Amino acid sequence: MHPAGSAAARSICTSCARGAWRRAFARTFPGESRYLGLAFRRPAAPGVTTCAPMPVQHYYSSFAVGDRAAAEFQATIGLELHVQLLAAQKLFSAASAKWDGPPNTNISAVDAGLPGSLPQLNPECVKLAARAILALNGQVQRRSAFDRKHYFYADQPLGYQITQQQHPVGRGGFIELGPLDGLDYTKRIGIHQLQLEQDTAKSVHGVYPGYVLVDLNRAGVALAEIVSEPDIETAEEAALYVRKVQMLLRHIGVSNCHMEEGSLRCDVNVSVYRSGDDRLSGTRCELKNLNSLKVIRGAINSEIDRQIDAIQRGEAVVQETRGYDAQNNRTFATRSKETAPDYRYMPEPDVPEICISDDWIEQLRNEMPESPEATLERMMTQYGLSQEDVETMLAEPGCTALFEQSVVGRDPKRVVSWITSEIFGQLAYRSQRLADSSLSAEQFAQLLDALNADTITSAQAKQALIAFMDGEQHTVGELIKAYGWEVISDQDELRNIAERLLEAHPKEVAGYLKGQTRRLNFFVGKLMQATQGQAKPQDASQIIKNLLEARR
């Protein structure tokens, strides 16, 4: 790559002839085509030959910094993850924690902030938070307490949030990243603390012009905020950290961590410093509400480049909160430090301290399942599975349990293939999670056994799977009888059907004999249709091929 100050790397005012510029860029910077389009304007209106200059500092992309700047500067990154806990009830009320129901149906007087209502701590939330910090290699605090964080907004009916700023339920811990996670080195990222807090309500825009509606279903849902130490140095490390925490919390049943649903939300603090300086000497900016791993990577890289660019131009980096425009790959200011609210933290007077005994912590530790890393290594060794297959199953809560209950006495690779292709395909089609599916391990095992014994065909097995996931309670054997799925194994019967098909389609027969081998698939499909899927495809193919070859 050319140095950052060279003519080739210099910011260019784009003209309407963008195609030529792109081709020149691709030749000059091979392998950097992912940055094309980040600093372009729309084509000019008809009759206008060039576009007006665009201030390049508003669009920050990695190629603008260059290798020299990348070596001169380094980044310090810390993450705050907000995780919705899988508790049936809210943190301080008996209302259901199902936030996605009809608006304002799962609420209580506490959630609505009505005068005279008092919060009552849900002990299940404390248990889930304690499981999380133990899984993160941290320590459950024997004494923890809640604070009030004051700010006024429509989605905060109390006028404050109950959180644990000063005395959290968990402290310490770490996440290890390494080759199995996609790094070619080992990295330990520390955990500063894990605190319990309330989620806010949901603001709904655009329903009525000029009005913002508020849905209180989410207000008071239990969150665990996981605050990392500023040990992260790259966007890739940050994304891998989030992915590993996500997998871990799903695996131990603390949260489903679906970023697309908002049950895992990420805030990122980014600063840069010159190599050799104190790594905490940079000015920190916070990126709020990043909701996917791709967005996390893009936002961090864009913000690093923005800060480096500002420093190189002699400008001060202002401490502020910023958002991320994924379409244009740029960050933008939303709130400066000067306008940030004073939260006026104070002890929460209506919720007593949490006191936890050593015996309770030890019991909880003994109940913890095997870690995802241990499960990954064990299943790869024990069953001969690929890392990708095991990680795919680990990403779906309950999937590894389904596999291990179904694999006994069966081919592991066939079992995992059916899980990751057919079962996952049905879950995606239904927008459903495995934990919410009616499919049992016993039913899945019956299906695999019937398929292995050639009692049913692959197509019929898929129909049986659909029936089971629709709530069917009959066994595979009963379904075979009910739907007439018995496999036709009589070769003479299949041959007679095939001969009638060849006689009925002389044009396709002639085409095959002239070298159009794809005609074979036509006849196989016709035979499967004629037998209503009761013929095995491999038998159908072999019989038809023999009959066609005999006509040469």
Image (cartoon, rainbow, N blue to C red):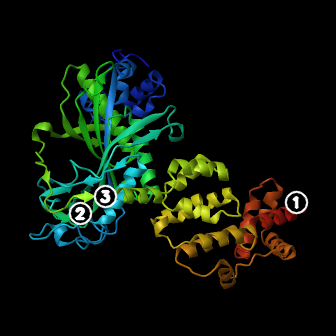
**In this view, 426 is above or below 234:** below
* Helix, strand or loop status at disc 3: loop
> Marks 3 and 2: CB-CB under 8 Å?
no
Q: Amino acid at mark 2?
A: Gly
Residue where numbered disc 1 is placed: 549
Residue at 69% x, 84% y: name it: 481
* Helix, strand or loop status at disc 2: loop
**The N terminus sits in image quarter:** top left
Q: Earlier in the sequence, mark 3 or mark 2?
A: 2
Please state the horizontal and vertical placement of residue 173, each as a whole percent of the image: 38, 43
* Helix, strand or loop status at disc 1: helix
* Mark 1 neighbour density, 10 Å: few (under 14) some (14–19) many (20 or more): few
466 lies left or right of 83:
right
Please state the horizontal and vertical placement of residue 212, each as a whole percent of the image: 16, 61
Residue at 51% x, 62% y: name it: 398
* Mark 2 neighbour density, 10 Å: few (under 14) some (14–19) many (20 or more): many
Residue at 27% x, 29% y: name it: 306
Q: Which mark is residue 356?
A: 3
Residue where numbered disc 2 is placed: 220
Please state the horizontal and vertical placement of residue 445, each as a whole percent of the image: 65, 69
Q: Nearer the viewer, residue 527 or 505?
A: 527
Q: Amino acid at mark 1?
A: Glu
Closer to the eye: label 3 or 1? 3
> Marks 1 and 2: CB-CB under 8 Å?
no
Residue farthest to the bottom? Answer: 482
